[in-house]
Each structure stands twice: as structure tokens, then as C-alpha cells.
Image (cartoon, helix red, strand yellow):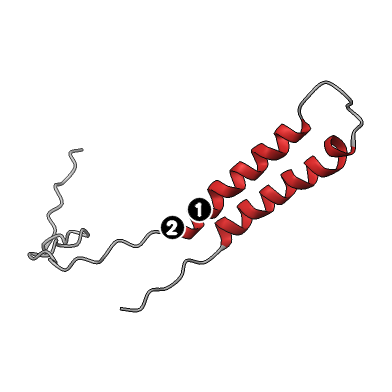
Amino acid sequence: MAQQQFKPTAPVKNTTAAKPAYKSTETKPVSFIFDKGNYRLFIISIAVVAFGFILMSGTTDIYSATKIVIAPIVVLGGFALGFFAIFKKPSVKVD
């Protein structure tokens, strides 16, 4: 038996949306997540962490108070400053 051809009675609608005929020429100013102050604090925090690791380095007198108490506190302070630099909201400028 041969199959019969099916012809739809209504035109088939396409589900894709039509593209708009115009383009918006309005541009918005670029706003960054971080401002200059955030980057400055983050660079300072990297320097504080590096200074803490320098305090920890060395081969003489591994049980000194500087290496086992002060240097880890300096490193943790640097990490805390880095987290603060990331989470600090940028100041809003009113024009």
C-alpha cells in the first residue's frame, strides 16, 4: 500500500522571532566592578603577604618568635586585607 501525501490546510508558522529592523545607538558608560582603591588595597595585601613569607624564610633559628608567631600573623593579615579589597564596594560618584 502506498502512503498518502499529507498537505497542511493552514500555513506552517515558524517559531523563531523576527529580528528588529533598527539598532539602538544609545551607549552606556562602562562601569567596572572594582575601582582604583580596590586595586590599590589588593596590591598592598600582596606585598604584606610576601613580606610575611620573607619573615618566615631562613635556615637559622627556626624556633624564633618572629618565624612562628609574627610572620604567620602578618600573612593572615595580608590575606584578610585581600578579602577586604575584594569585597569593598566602590565609591559611587554623583555627577
Callout 1 amino acid: Arg
Mark number for residue 58?
none
Q: Secondary structure at mark 2?
A: helix
- Residue 70 in the image: state x and y as whole percent: 82, 44
Q: Quadrant of the C terminus?
A: bottom left
* Mark 2 closeness class: few <14, some 14–19, many ≥20 residues within 10 Å: few
- In the rendered image, the residue lying farthest to the left is 21
**Point 90% across, 33% down: residue:** 64
Residue lying at the far bottom of the rendered structure: 94
Nearest the viewer among 26 and 13 is: 26
Quadrant of res 68: top right
Task: Looking at the picture, tell me which residue is in the foreground, 65 or 85.
Answer: 65
Residue carrying label 1: 40
Q: Residue at x 67, y 48 (%)?
A: 78
- Residue 48, image x and y in percent? 65, 44
Residue 36: assigned label:
2
